[in-house]
Image (cartoon, helix red, strand yellow):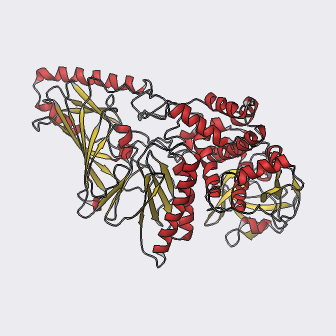
Amino acid sequence: MSRNRSFFATKGHAAQAEAVRMLKPALLVVLFCLLVSAATTAMKAATSQLTTPKAGPNQLELTYTLGMERPSTHLLQVEITAKEVTGPVLRFAMPVWAPGRYAIYDFAKGVQEFTAQGANGQALPWAQPDKQTWIVNSSDCGGTVVVRYKVFANDLTGSFSQFDTSHGAINGASVFMYLPGNKPDPITLTIHPPQGWKIISGFSISPTETTFQVPNYDILVDTPLEIAPDCWVSDFEEGGKTFRVAVHSYGSSPDEVSLRSSLVDGVKKIVSSEMAMMPEPDFKHYTFLFHFDPDIAMGDGMEHLNSTDIIVRGSLSSSGVSQALETAAHEFFHLWNVKRLRPVGLGPFNYSHEVYTRSLWFVEGITTYYSYVNLLRSGIWSQQEFLDRLAGEIRALREDPGRRLMSAESSSFHAWFYDRAPQMQETNFANTTISYYNKGALLGMLLDLEIRSATHGTKSLDDVMRLMYRKFYESPATSYYLHGRGYTEADILTAVNQVSGADFAPFFQKYVAGTAPLPYNEIFAKAGMSLNIATSANAPPSLGVLVEPVDTGDKIFSVIPGGAADRAGLSRDDILISVDDQSLVTDTLEDRLGIYPAGAKVLFEVQRRESHRFIYVQLDPPQPDEYSITEVPGASEGQIKIRQGWLEGEQVGASHSAPTDAAAGGVRKSASS
């Protein structure tokens, strides 16, 4: 991810000063007291409980209008009208984050030209007590406050918005302000798109509808919009519900028709598989929004209540469709896991600061695991592809130095540091963190197999997901936001114990809350399977660094603790110029090291700041680079039952033969962590 500096300057002071000068001197003291009082209230609200009170007698009549007059400027026009205003001040705020992306983005950076008026068009004084809040003096508003502002939108991601001459991809949290204390109030949203543009979103299945009735602010910002002149749409029915696949892409391909058909066919299989596994969701229609763009920095995927926003870095191609389907399997499963079945704090949302949870390993990691499971069950993946992907996840965690320092719970809690968060300082995250997606997926795999073993193949992690969904979502609402209530980390353990009839507390303590090596082969053995780790014959000896190419060689951006480079005194930001006088500009580090045996002392030319030095490094043995999960010959009847239940038992569609043993040479060893 590239690092960008962003600058923000507040631009309301001139208008504010002009409004204040228009007031009579006697009112200045009153205004000052009102603003100070409101600012104090704002600060208290920012530290209040996460839940928001249900709408009461102070409910406002809210109308939001989105204008899209000049696509070439990337500026969206927003108007918010609040009626039935009775208080002396009215607060408006931009979210600092958007649900699903655990990073502080300060969406107020995109706001400009804020104004406020009363019922008769009179200018209303306003002030900003902090970066995200605007306080309007509504004492003389006549019962109505109208605020207008513009938002700069030119980022195609699952969190930000993009508005240009080809489309408007709108993510509500980056565009729409909310009124603290009035988030539960119903909203009327009206969109004025350019002529000929259609609106695709979870609000309606009609592309020509421009006005929508929205239950509350949380739903407003949980419903992305694709507004474009050219957006291909196809729909199908499954389980009495309508599903739409919308595609926005650049350029054209002779295979465009067949590629879109493949995409829709794959989405159908995913929807069928996941709906067969989980309870019926409470929506009438669901929309998949796909963007294919080869010019963006990275792809993305974001879950929503009855839609998903999936962004593929690349053109509409075979590989692009494969990537889109894998992301779709993940995001669609989120409609149960996190959008409805959710941890405490993740709905209704506090948009003013971070909301911490230790359960993202379950929210994202288990969802990743089930995306793989349902790609298998749907027939999109073969058993071998499924096992290979899990083996790849195991390799990723084993090669991550942070696995010894950070637990799955800690990774979840500290997500705000690294879930695509802006990084303006140097960190040691490469050596100290892990991914809750990665370890969570592996925990899901192990829990699934352990539950199957404990119940002799009669229950699985599927049953845990269904139990928790019914217990925590299909229950009376505890707030204005959806059904049910949030769960805690302890609730996950309770559900696993209930389904399995066993005590999983030691497992959770060691592997979820702790950093003990994961017991792969101990658990795989219960399904008559084994994890095999091998080192290929041509694997180079290990230097113990992560590098990126620069003009003069390879720049070190991470030194693995205890590795060869660390022992020799190589440091982050060192530039490796040559190996035994052989330039690293004309060949890769891996190829240069490939000619040496393990244990060789090799001379490196190193640039450190403005000086050049020569450092000998004794190379370590090659790192394992072949991972496979295979069947164990002579498995018992019980082991075979568990294995078949895992790989075949709930598969939807075509069946596949059991995976063959992957050929691998070199030294093998039993796997743990």
Q: From the top left corner, tell me how far across and down residue 244 is, in percent.
A: 42, 58
> Residue most toward the front?
240
The one of 1 and 53 positioned closer to us in this rendering: 53
Q: Is residue 92 visible?
A: yes
The one of 556 and 448 positioned closer to us in this rendering: 448
Q: Is the C terminus in the top left, top right, bottom left or bottom right quadrant?
A: top right
The one of 466 and 503 positioned closer to us in this rendering: 466
Residue 60 is left or right of residue 6, and the answer is: left
Residue 606, located in which quarter of the rendered image? bottom right
The one of 456 and 565 positioned closer to us in this rendering: 456
At horizontal 67% and vertical 43% (from top left) the residue drawn is: 444
Q: From the top left corner, tell me how far across and down residue 101 is, in percent.
A: 49, 44
Q: From the top left corner, tell me how far across and down residue 669 is, in percent.
A: 87, 53
**Total label count?**
0
At horizontal 48% and vertical 50% (from top left) the residue drawn is: 302
Compared with 413, 300 (above or below) is: below
At horizontal 88% and vertical 62% (from top left) the residue drawn is: 666
Residue 577 is left or right of residue 340, and the answer is: right
Residue 545, located in which quarter of the rendered image? bottom right
Q: Is residue 324 visible?
A: no
Q: From the top left corner, tell me how far across and down residue 111 is, in percent.
A: 31, 45
